[in-house]
Image: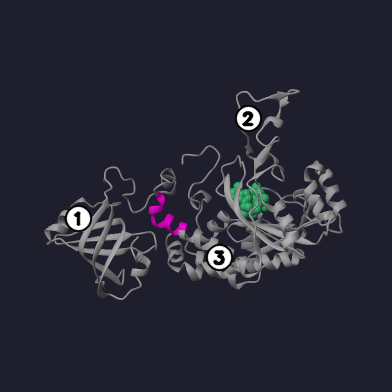
Amino acid sequence: MNGLQIKDILALPGDSREIAVDGWVRTKRESKNVCFLELSDGSSINNIQVVVDLSSRDLADVIEKITTGSSIRASGFLVQSQGSEQSVEIAAKAISIYGTAPADEYPLQKKRHSFEFLREIAHLRARTNTFGAIARVRSSMSFAIHSFFQERGFVYVHTPIITGSDCEGAGQMFQVTTLPLENPPMKDGAIDYSEDFFGKKASLTVSGQLEGETYATALSRVYTFGPTFRAENSNTSRHLAEFWMIEPEIAFCDIHGNMDLAEEFIKYILTWLLEKCPDDMQFFNTRIDREIITTLRGIIDNRFERITYTEAISLLEKSGENFEFPVHWGSDLQSEHERYITEKVFKKPVIITDYPKEIKAFYMKLNDDGKTVRAMDVLVPRLGEIIGGSEREADYSTLKKRMIDLGLNPEDYWWYLDLRRFGSVPHAGFGLGFERLIQFVTGMQNIRDVIPYPRCVKTLEF
Ligand code: ATP
Ligand code: MN
């Protein structure tokens, strides 16, 4: 490992100190006597320029073998740059090659490739500006999320990835089994899961919430941040089959505390991003979405509007817009509706609460009207829903009745119901899809481009 990364070197003065730098060649420009190499080591969106004097025979010989994508070490003097693009550059004294990248085979030759093409070479796309920036933003945002919760006394809980409870997303679950698929053991005309690995049917988790609640009702404030799996059988730009989710769960907290936390959380992580990743964000602002920084600042600086679902429906009915999905009280809000409310009506984030119980999950607290539940969705301009959460039903009988009404078997949830039998407390929480967040803050159009290796229906190359 070399001492300094390019991001650190670029911040040094050009005082002719001797320096060595390792990286991959992004571009090579040659004139008669001099060659310019743009070198990247992924530490920053900015490359360092290496200036090579071709009148030196040794250097000229090495340069000949170097093409875009080659990995090299350049050593020389750090000097003030002549060009306007960068402040310092390396006047090369010696260059050694780690590995070449044959120009007729290395696919990243052009400056810009389509994102579709880059998805086909996902193993190399992190070497481009966009995907390098996304990787750094993902990393920094992960840290921001942990930092936010840790500063507030939340305990990071690792909820299971394999689960025996098929919670919310019945049809959306990936099954986990060691049974032979060609010839599974049968009993009374059905597959005999007692012979499966766990002795029962098992799946990959679609949410850590229920287990999160069990820890929140012991440790008061917890959060999860882990992989989540949903067999989303549709090709959208917002759905992955494997994604990461952040789910805080708070005891002694109602929906208002939950909304306050969600708003504070979003503002904290966006502020963090603009502070810690200014160069990458400038890149996204220039190359991906010219309004992204303004949008993020708008979110940080504005109080989130809070309205009920009923109010939202009446705004939509009065809108005069020609929506693809017509709205009426009782219908679920589609992203076109969510965007109308945030972009056209309020021009800032909006939290919508108190949805009809029919369109929300069984665990949400029933309001006194018997018709709506204490759900809260946080909507942002250009994306729609970014967070979904609720105050949880803390009353044993009401929860059990909700399960039965929805065709769930309370016996399958005996441990979850126990939380309402023993020291039940008001509690609330929410879920934030990490990739939706990254999509939103970078302005990237497709969710497949904000995770290193997207898993989607009918695609699993890597
Ligand atoms: P949607 O209506 O967009 O499918 P949902 O109602 O299924 O979302 P929740 O069950 O509330 O979503 O999940 C919590 C959060 O997880 C969502 O707000 C979203 O940010 C994210 N999310 C849900 N499904 C996916 C997915 N397939 N890929 C990526 N993120 C997802
Ligand atoms: Mn969904």
Q: What is the distance, in whole Å, between disc 3 and disc 1 at their CAs? A: 42 Å
Give the label on residue 254, or none: none
Q: Which residue is mark 2?
A: 179
Q: Position of residue 345 (x, y in %)?
A: 66, 64
User: In the image, which residues are magenta?
Assistant: 125-135
Residue 373, picture quadrant: bottom right
- How dense is the environment of label 3, judged by Cα within 10 Å: few (below 14), some, or many (20 and up)? many
Q: What is the distance, in whole Å, between disc 3 and disc 2 at their CAs? A: 41 Å
Q: Is mark 1 within 8 Å of ligand 1?
A: no
For label 1, the SS is helix
Task: Describe residue 32's horizontal placement relative to residue 351 as left or right.
Answer: left
Q: Earlier in the sequence, mark 3 or mark 2?
A: 3
Tag 1: residue type?
Ile
Q: Which residue is mark 3?
A: 144
Q: Which residue is mark 1?
A: 63
Q: What is the distance, in whole Å, between disc 2 and disc 1 at their CAs? A: 57 Å
Q: Earlier in the sequence, mark 3 or mark 1?
A: 1
Residue 157 vertical position relative to residue 192 in the rendered view, above or below: below
